[in-house]
Amino acid sequence: MKAVAVFPRQPNTMHLAELPAPQVGDVPNGRGVRVQVLRVGGCGTDKEINAGEYGAAPPGYDFLVIGHENFGRVLEVGPQVRGLRAGDYVVATVRRPGHSLYDLIGTYDMTTDDTYYERGINLLHGYCTEQYVDDPEFLVKVPPGLKDVGVLLEPCSVVEKGIAEAYETQRRLRIWRPQRAAVLGAGPVGLLATLALRLRGLEVVTLARSMPPTTQSRMVEALGAQYLSTKQTSLTAAVPTHGPFDLIFEATGYAPIAFEAMDVLGKDGVLILSSVTGGNQTAEVPADRINLGFVLGNKVMLGTVNANREYFELGVRDFALAEATYPGWLRGLLTNRVAGLDQWAEFLRQLTDDHDAIKVYLEVAPDSE
């Protein structure tokens, strides 16, 4: 069975590998679900793993199958599986349980273990292959009406988790009702964050580097949000007109801007960080002013990363609402299609070099339904 893999921690080693075909019995107690992979999305994480920045192969292998943004169709289920059947569309979660208390109660994305398990990222093979088998606990059903955009559900789950945790944290304020938000970055996560916040009724300004008009700026404006280029208006300069910001969602991949966001966040506000950044970049910041603002302004900062199934299910709900409210908008994110696992080099090229792309995805197999 074909798979696209890397040799972890060795730069630029993406290649076509072979895996044994999975069997439904690979998951014990009759709980196996065999899934045909239809689409796999690419993102900065895949580029960074190919660059050798992080990642680890599963035990017994010297390579790691990449791909965590996934969408597929159920081929076969074990005798103890309920709620799923052949033909259903599913998206699989990424993080898998470890051994901490949080892992044991289903919130494995909040593990305190030093070693973590993520499909396509660390110690577990990903979904950039023809088929996989998993337990139904980690499979989220996607309605047929959302099958064209199902591959976007995994990045959306990161957004859903961050926003849900922001609201949960602010229950301490009893009557927190955010009105204005800023989204930093107009890549897939930034655009999905803009969508999610608009669906919740917030006024949103999305800031990114590119000068409008661009595909991204038009998509932001189609949601009734405002797009600003940071080449013309910095986040700080946007506050008098568009703020104060009750919520800021950072999705740039550029760590220093997080400190500017900390500085300008409104009182009782929440800053959500979603960028996973490698390297050792440093920045000079107004530390005393930021500290004072957080203490006196009752501000909160939190991070969001690979989510558990609760947030995937919230994503399905928001996708259905988005299709009704902004028909066709989600499909506009899927800008670059590459067909076939054999075309992994073109997939990587577009992911790396096509700066106009929003979402590059690999069509592993056509949907026969």
Image: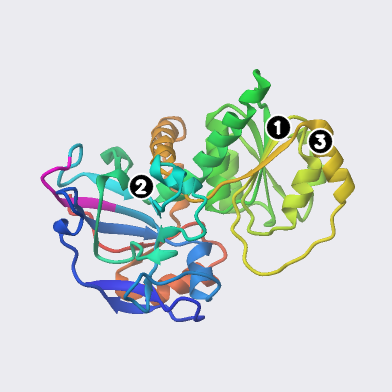
Q: Which residue is drawn at 83% across and 43% down?
A: 291
* Dot 2: element: helix
Q: Residue 150 carries which label?
A: 2
Q: Where is the N terminus found, in terms of image quarters?
A: bottom left
Q: Which mark is residue 246?
A: 1
In the image, residue 222 lies at what x, y percent?
55, 39
Q: How crowded is mark 1: few (under 14 residues within 10 Å), some or many (20 or more)?
A: many
Q: Which residue is drawn at 80% across and 35% down?
A: 241
Q: Which of marks 1 and 3 is in front?
A: 3
Q: Disc 2 or 1, which lies upstream in sequence?
A: 2
Q: How crowded is mark 3: few (under 14 residues within 10 Å), some or many (20 or more)?
A: few
Q: Which mark is residue 357?
A: none
Q: Disc 1 or 3, which lies upstream in sequence?
A: 1
Q: In this view, does 244 lie to the left or right of 248?
A: right
Residue that carries the numbered disc 3 in the rendered image:
295
Q: Is residue 315 left or right of residue 282?
A: left
Q: Residue at x 42, y 31 (%)?
A: 321
What amino acid type is highlighted by mark number 3? Val
Q: Are marks 1 and 3 in contact (CB under 8 Å)?
A: no
Camera-side residue of 49 and 9: 9
Magenta stretch? 72-81
